[in-house]
Amino acid sequence: MICLGIESTAHTFGCGIVSDKGGKCSILANEKDSVTTEEGGLIPRELAKHHFEKAKEVIESGLKKANLKMKDIDLVAFSQGPGIGQALRVGAIAARTLALANEKPLLGVNHCVAHVEIGKAMTGAKDPIVVYVSGANTQIIGYEEGKYRVFGETLDIGLGNLLDSFGRKMGLGFPAGPALDKMYFEKKKYVELPYTVKGMDLAFSGLGTAAGQKIGKERKEDLAYGLLHNAFAMLAEVSERALAHTEKEELLLTGGVAASKALREMLEKMCNARNAKFFVPPFSVCVDQAAMIAWLGLVEFRAGNRMKVKESGIDPRQRTDAIRVNWLD
Ligand code: FE2
């Protein structure tokens, strides 16, 4: 089967085309166009405007890249949530239109679960604890008894937002992650900053505020190191406990912040210490894109999941652990 997927939860409008021939995930196209802002921060109506303006072009370019026509597509999938309502709505309308006009089945899928499933498909990880870290999302996820459970998550902002808001105060531009990561490896000393783990959950905003107040008082590389070190160590602590609790032996890192070499090094060290395997998918599928939506669409369709158009409403607050996972075991 071949699925065309649409992603539009936040800054990215994407069209991915994926085949599951031979049970394998083959990405035939993964086109996207993203809103970029100098100041950061996403304004919902501007996202919607961008997605509406780019939708046709991105979808056409996906089909062209895959060298296919709509008649060759067997299924249309889209991100149903979580995300920004106005942005999600554009993707849902595009997907419904494509499905209805071409008489194809339609399936709305969960964005976070899609990150997990494409990560597994691309790395060969079987049953990992997943560290999903992006601008808005920070979750430690693992499969247990019919659902992807959230073992730990941020109580305030996402890890990527922490890095970008701190980077903005430092005048690093957007996204700030790569510049901060470079500074991390140029530190001379550790600057004392908050470290906030509450049970299995994390909080980043106090760390960001404290680090912001020290700008100009400490060497910027040392400050970047302190911020990244604490944030990543908090994640490593919680994901190690999730591994220990579930007795799983694989860790999969995904989301935009997976680009951080510092984060990868820290998690890999933790995995090595407890003999767990560490996986990071190619960066092109870590970030928000639509191949993951198309792939999860195929996985769910094969498991028998179907959706009527009237059930295809968006769900901006849809939780990872609200999805019944009937395609494993
Ligand atoms: Fe994402």
Image: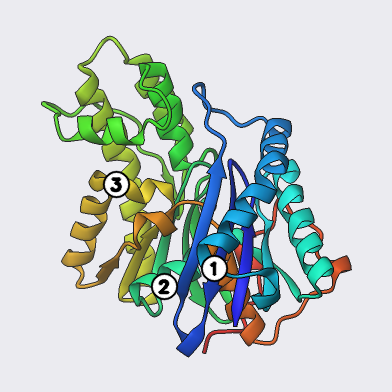
Instruction: Determine contact: label 1, label 3, CB under 8 Å.
Output: no
Q: Is residue 118 above or below residue 215?
A: below
Residue, far left = 188
* Amino acid tagged 2: Lys
Instruction: State the residue position of label 3.
Output: 233
Based on the displayed image, in which of its 4 quarters is residue 178 positioned?
A: top left
Give the secondary structure at mark 2: helix
**Residue at 37%, 30% in the rendered image:** 176
Tell which circle, 1 or 2, labels the residue nearer the N-terminal end: 1
Query: How far is mark 1 from mark 2, CA to CA?
Result: 26 Å
**Residue at 71%, 81% in the rendered image:** 305
The label nearer to you, 1 versus 3, is: 1
Instruction: State the residue position of label 2.
Output: 120
Residue, far top = 216
- Image quadrant holding the N terminus, namely bottom right
Q: Is residue 175 above or below residue 97?
A: above
Give the x, y percent position of residue 23: 48, 87
Tell which circle, 3 or 2, labels the residue nearer the N-terminal end: 2
Asked whether 73 or 11 is in front, the reply is: 73
* Amino acid tagged 1: Asn
Residue density around tag 3, few if under 14, some if 14–19, many if 20 or more, within 10 Å? some
Instruction: State the residue position of label 1.
Output: 67
Give the secondary structure at mark 1: loop
